[in-house]
Image (spheres, rainbow, N blue to C red):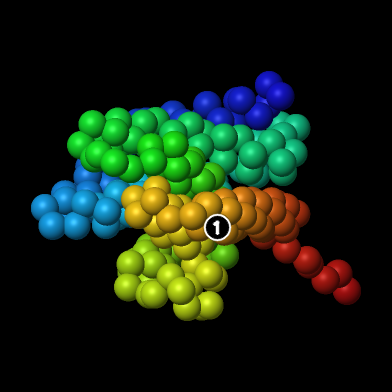
């Protein structure tokens, strides 16, 4: 447990020392919210949740890329693969919750006649999903630019695709549309159930993917070369 917290502290320090990045993370969802507040209050809630997901996924993407240099040294110091990826996820979840709280308060004070508990659930599932999603992209894609472009495509599709389409369920933040419909339009609990199941399953699958990718990467020894002796 101590090693897990040590990795989490290292990841938090890496994020906190980038004050410009923190400012962008804080303001990015606000831009999403204000873009739809004037005419579509319901969409503004959906958009701010997507903004939180995009901001945290981007932070996780860069955090995963930045950790590649220090991970081999931590492994030599006795840290295991699960210490590294779970510690980093823990740090990102803490950042995500800290990012979500002021926006939940904004919705609570600015919006009326919505189910606030469901809004809090959307943000919690978004944080749980966005952190492993960004880390998974950093593990699969070798360059930050490629991962950022994938994030742009995913969030763009999330905004324009009809949530009733079967293909929309393959997107990581589909649950936000379902639960938001329950919270804003006061529909029946089926929307809440579908969104909750989808969010939990996606978060679990992405977390498992991060664990698998991290284990494979840390077992590789790219600095070793086989030399044939004649």
For the C terminus, the image quarter is bottom right
Decide if residue 57 is in sight here: no
Q: Is residue 213 left or right of residue 191?
A: right
Seen from this angle, which residue lies furthest top?
2
Reading the image, the residue beneath label 1 is 190
Q: Is residue 172 left or right of residue 83?
A: left
Residue 155 x/y as whole percent = 37, 64
Seen from this angle, which residue lies furthest right?
230
For the N terminus, the image quarter is top right
Q: Residue at x 16, y 51 (%)?
A: 37
Q: Residue at x 43, y 55 (%)?
A: 187
Tag 1 secondary structure: helix
Q: Determine whether 221 is above or below 119 in the image.
A: below
Front residue of 179 and 141: 179
Decide if residue 211 is in sight here: yes
Seen from this angle, which residue lies furthest left?
38
Front residue of 180 and 225: 180
């Amino acid at each position: 447990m101590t090693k897990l917290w040590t990795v989490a502290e290292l990841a938090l320090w890496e994020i906190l020392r980038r004050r410009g990045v923190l400012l962008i993370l804080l303001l990015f969802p606000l831009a999403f919210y204000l873009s739809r507040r004037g005419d579509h209050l319901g969409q503004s809630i959906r958009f701010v949740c997507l903004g939180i997901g995009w901001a945290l996924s981007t932070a996780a993407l860069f955090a995963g890329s930045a950790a590649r240099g220090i991970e081999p040294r931590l492994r030599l110091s006795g840290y295991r693969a699960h210490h590294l990826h779970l510690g980093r996820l823990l740090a990102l979840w803490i950042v995500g919750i800290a990012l979500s709280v002021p926006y939940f308060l904004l919705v609570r004070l600015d919006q009326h006649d919505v189910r606030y508990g469901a809004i809090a659930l959307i943000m919690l599932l978004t944080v749980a999903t966005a952190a492993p999603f960004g880390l998974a992209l950093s593990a699969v894609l070798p360059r930050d630019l490629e991962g950022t472009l994938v994030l742009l495509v995913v969030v763009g599709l999330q905004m324009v695709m009809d949530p009733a389409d079967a293909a929309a369920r393959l997107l990581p933040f589909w649950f936000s549309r379902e639960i938001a419909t329950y919270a804003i339009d006061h529909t029946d609990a089926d929307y809440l159930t579908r969104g909750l199941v989808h969010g939990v399953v996606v978060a679990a699958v992405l977390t498992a993917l991060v664990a698998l990718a991290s284990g494979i990467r840390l077992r590789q020894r790219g600095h070793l070369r086989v030399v044939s002796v004649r």
